[in-house]
Image (spheres, helix red, strand yellow):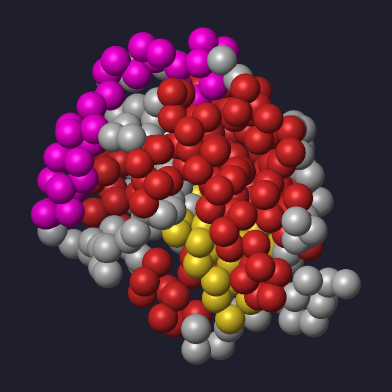
Amino acid sequence: MTNTSGTRAIVLGGGGVAGIAWQIGVLATLLEHGIELNDADLVVGTSAGSVVGASLRFGVLREALAAQLYQHETEQGPAGPGELPHFSVEEFINMMSSAALGPGGEQEARARIGKAALAAGQGLSETRWVDTIRSLLPAPSWPSGLLKVTTVNANDGAFHVFDQSSGADLARAVAASCSVPGAWPPVLIDGIPYMDGGMRSASNADLATGYDKVLVLSCAPEAPDSPFGPTLPQVLRGLSEGAETFLIEADEASLSAFGTNMLLSSTRRPSALAGQEQGAAVVDAVKVFWGV
């Protein structure tokens, strides 16, 4: 029987196409072992995590896992073969480094990223990008369980969170959260262009402040600090003062499955399989943590 005392949150971080597959593999495996994660009072999704969070909230993780394992690379998805010829991982890293060096604080640094995102030549139109994300979502409207989708205003670098009370279209909110600068275009919501919520933090786990138990999935180790916003190590230290936390961070085998470009469709199957293996390895510990 599930222990329902206290409030529980799940934080799902960014990680591109590989991160979607890996997190789905982990969560679907936990679900198969009787851990009802959708009982969470809050799900926070950043970038890849926003897609995964929707699958969790709509109760379709099993189907989502099957799609990751068996979908052919040429079928529709966030990135197909040759779909991102304009995107360079090296150029992206250089852009982030340049944005970090300018004057001002975290929001100003994120605004410099937004300027680069708006100026970047895009290989995919905003309409096609939103339609692509819409095709990945189980339903057109927001789920009944609380799902918070993180974004950054590309104009001024302000952090913005969408949920069912925001009035935003779910697909546009998730597409915005997934819009890696230079890879996919910022998405207009109420006339404002929004980009990847990971430009503030790969996890934005501080949104789970105040919850009694916080389960975090992170696709890669985070630096101890960042010029763009709070990092996971910083937030976990703060959360641990008033909450129990459990971190599932991609292990060495999972990182190997991700490869050097986590945006490629070819990473889906190996990343999902790695997620299944890592999920199986932590089942017993997560059962104790979640109160199963």
Q: Is residue 86 magenta?
A: yes
242 over 132 or under it: above or below:
below
Residue 243 point in image, percent of width and height: 58, 83
Please tell me whether residue 82 is drawn above or below residue 87 in the rendered image.
Answer: above
Q: Is residue 102 left or right of residue 145?
A: left
Q: In this view, does 246 lie to the left or right of 79?
A: right
Report the quarter where the N terminus lies. Answer: bottom right
Identity of the residue drawn at 44% across and 30% down: 267
Q: Residue 289 at x, y = what percent?
A: 66, 75
Q: In which quarter of the image is the C terminus?
A: bottom right
Q: Which residue is drawn at 68% across and 46% down?
A: 28
Q: Is residue 71 or residue 136 the one in the foreground?
A: 71
Q: In this view, does 155 lie to the left or right of 97?
A: right
Q: What residue is drawn where x is 68% and y is 30%? A: 66
Determine if the magenta segment contains residue 89: yes
Between 55 and 186, the one nearer to me in the picture: 55
Which region of the structure is painted magenta? 73-102
Q: Nearer the viewer, residue 13 or 272?
A: 272
